[in-house]
Amino acid sequence: MQRQLYKSPIAAKTLVLTALVTAFIGGIEPTQSLEPYQYKTSPSKESLDQVVDNIMTPYVRRNAFAGVVLVADGPQTAHSKAYGEVIPGEGIQHQVNSEWRWASVTKMVAGLLVMQEIEGGRLSLDQVVSSLLPQAPDHFKTVTLRQLMNHTSGLANPDQTEIDSTTGVYEWASASIPNFAYCYGPPLAEAGSRFDYNACDFIVLADILKTITGQDFQSLVKTRITERYSLDSIKVVNDVQDDAEIVGTKRGKPVNDGLKLANLSADAAIVGKPTDLLKLTQLFMADEIITDAVLKREFGRGIPEFGQVALTVWGYRATLTGCKEPVDIIERQGHLPGTKILTLQAPDLRRSIVLFSNREETDWGWIWQEYGLSYTLASEVFCRPKTYS
């Protein structure tokens, strides 16, 4: 099921629509499919900066991308550049260090915090949620932590609630005071029976983290991520009047969505700089956030029957143009009105790609289908010779 905050029709991007496709998007409205720009891999002839510029320029010219592209190669930032105007026609160019909504990338951050608790022995993946939240309803006795993290919990889904007639956004997302009671309502399915992309899974995860650590999600991100790793821009929005610096756009106009980030908690409430998200991927790949190799591998192990969903991310093995062997990739996308984020990590190569675009029209394509912007960039970045020692 594709997640909507707006009440609008949903169109399939392809005739063969799988859980992988719908889950990654987590979006607001369908975007027009763009003919993918094909670029032939030639790492020995051009620098990475030249290659990325060649790939991105056609997308920027047709207003199908505007924002930031970052690449990490081991401990080094191999490419860092902003592309295009913030608002089409206004002349203000994007900057690498602007503050953005992180949307569902927030889920990945929440997942890292949970994995730290598992590594510390305070949680376990197959622990039932009722043992962590004693006041939870009876149906929580069959839901495990793993099922929350891979969207197979069967919990109530806030996208089944009412639309605010004034804002056109679900009431839960535009309310003046956050209220997460709906997540503890009647379930939609038996735990473990199906995949359902659901904000409640992560709202409940935030409640579990608070029970275990004594800190709410905002404080936990601040102490465990922002301060511990000196990623100073990362914060959880906790005030309904607060938002990010960069506004999303659609059809060349700013999106005024009525959305209150404070209502999204561990689902999508983080804001920060793209550069700090890149550093976060580098820390993960360098075993700084999760040190246990087995646990780290489990974090990105996709489940085939549920569209390769892993634990708050997607994990799969990709065949890329220019690579001699398939590459294990961890992918996380985010999408809120007019803003799209893509993160791709190849932990075995210690390389990652981070893209932020404030164009609703941006289409990442699909690596598993071997087409589009994400596939082209992944092939160029992950198949290049090693450049660090």
Image: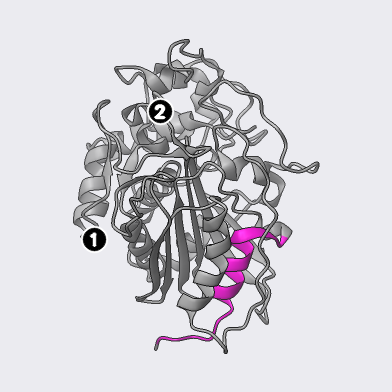
> Quadrant of the image for the N terminus?
top right
Residue that badge 1 annotates: 229
Counting from the top left corner in percent of width and height, residue 218 is at 25, 38
Counting from the top left corner in percent of width and height, residue 364 is at 59, 53
As for residue 383 lying within the magenta part, the answer is yes
Residue sitting nearer the eye, 246 or 341: 246
Instruction: For mark 2, give the secondary structure.
Output: loop
Q: Which residue is found at the position 62% from the left and 67% from the top?
A: 376
Answer left or right for 239 relative to 92.
left
Q: Which residue is found at the position 69% from the left and 51% from the top?
A: 304
User: From where the camera sits, is residue 156 visible?
Assistant: no
Counting from the top left corner in percent of width and height, residue 253 is at 45, 35
Report which quarter residue 327 is drawn in.
bottom right
Counting from the top left corner in percent of width and height, residue 106 is at 40, 44
User: From where the camera sits, is residue 201 visible?
Assistant: yes
> Quadrant of the image for the C terminus?
bottom left
Where is 206 relative to 84, above or below? above
Residue that badge 2 annotates: 256
Q: Which residue is found at the position 27% from the left and 49% from the top?
A: 234
Number of numbered discs on residues: 2
Residue sitting nearer the eye, 22 or 47: 47
Q: Which residues are magenta?
A: 370-388
Q: Amino acid at mark 2?
A: Asn
Mark 1 crowdedness (10 Å alpha carbons): few <14, some 14-19, many ≥20: some
Q: Nearer the N terminus, badge 1 or badge 2?
A: 1
